[in-house]
Image (cartoon, rainbow, N blue to C red):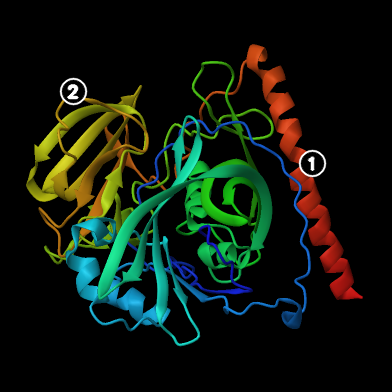
Amino acid sequence: MMPEAHQPPRRRHVTRSLLFAAGGLFLTAAALAVVQPSPPPEPVFQARQTLDLPPLDARANHDAAPYIASTRIRRGDTVADLLNRLGINENGLLAFLTHDARARSIYKLYPGRTVQAALNDQGRMVWLRYAHTPGATAKSGVDSAWLEVRPEHDGFSAQERTIAAVRETRIAEGEINSSLFGAADQAQIPDAVTMEMVDILGSRIDFLKDLRKGDRFRIVYEAYMHDGEQVGTGHIRALEFINKGKTYSAVWFQNGQQPGGYYDFSGASLKGAFLRTAIKFTRISSGFGMRMHPIHNKWIGHKGVDYAAPSGTPIYATADGSVEFIGRQNGYGNVIILKNFGKYSTLYAHQSRFAKGLKKGDRVQQGQLIGYVGSTGWATGPHLHYEFRIDKRPVDPLAVDLPVARTLDSADRKAFQAVAARYLPQIELLARLQESRIQVAQQ
């Protein structure tokens, strides 16, 4: 992933598939903050050619190239876990990494990011690299930053390095067999891109319960490269998702200085007036309607939907609005009530704490962090109680037809159609390739 004086003949990458499941397809996972992406720059199209490597005996080199090991950080990993997976056993290295100020960037391990090591033929470490900032966007391009640690005399040295990256456009498709992340890993789509796909279509598809085996997605996204290695990812430019036989599409569009956003191929905005859920990747623990109350032990009407999640999981506003109430309220515990627009309002209860600085009267935007899951009030365990109200009357948020956002006006539509025309052929190409593979398999 990083430039090196002697590139190794081959690299072995140790990766893992992130498999989340909810409703039979996802594992409960800590929520990840996904916000509306900043406007991506215009893509740069590049053609690349894959060349066969020469025979091993044609690469005469007295100094054998190092063996490259790579692993992705998992939630809960320690530095010692990473060193073990990379096969590193250097006396004093762990103490150096965890105590030396020059290696401070490894103090914070971000799940999904990469740690690499080069080992010589004796199994000794040549270098260790932690790509803590892959593809940080800057006006002048994209810089990828990493920590590099090398043996030095009787100890180690650490240095921060950066490189400029080139933006490329990539296309990929996947089919869901067990989970969305499993399919994305099979298609070699980065986790950040997968999460952005969930955010873009969150007002159209309930990724907690709507996914089915056989669902497919096709995607055009940006990747940032250096010396043939991917060092970061950009934003999704276009995508198509087929869920339960229905096709959903998205294209990024920005006209002039106006705020950009995602629209389907017909020009309708994908920023729905309301998101279906306030927590990313969780599970429904109690639905709307009559239920046996876990504390009062009697049948009682449940006016919202409960989402089970670990304490501290971020909670996001499902729509634009203003804070009508924030504080403690009887059985709701710590609760926020948002006045959204017109006759609509939403309630978020049992929070452990609220977003810093949030107060009554504040304006919030869809997808903005407003608090954290807890078990305050009448709760037997950590979860979010979410209510969707029309004229102050709770209705089932999973069954009601949510208000939709506006479509493009005539002044923008022509410009949008020109942008969409760039990506439709790429999406259609992926569809034709899939049909060809099916025909070959049937023969």
Residue at numbered disc 2: 361
Q: Secondary structure at mark 1?
A: helix
In the rendered image, the vertical position of residue 347 relative to residue 261, given as above or below: below
Count neighbours of disc 2 (C-alpha within 10 A) and say few if under 14, some if 14 to 19, many if 20 or more. some
- Which of 288 and 332 lies nearest the eye of the viewer? 332
In the rendered image, the vertical position of residue 435 relative to residue 279, given as above or below: below
In the rendered image, the vertical position of residue 53 relative to residue 255, given as above or below: below
The C terminus, quarter of image: bottom right
Q: Mark 1 or mark 2: name the one nearer the start of the chain.
A: 2
- Percent position of residue 3, x then y: 53, 57
Furthest toward the top, the residue is 411
In the rendered image, the vertical position of residue 315 relative to residue 118, given as above or below: above
Kind of residue indicated by mark 2: Gly
Q: Quadrant of residue 356?
A: top left
Kind of residue indicated by mark 1: Pro
- Percent position of residue 199, x then y: 47, 45
| Distance Cα–Cα, label 1 vs label 2 | 47 Å
- Percent position of residue 111, x then y: 36, 62
| Point 21% across, 25% down: residue | 362
Residue at numbered disc 1: 425
- Mark number, residue 109: none
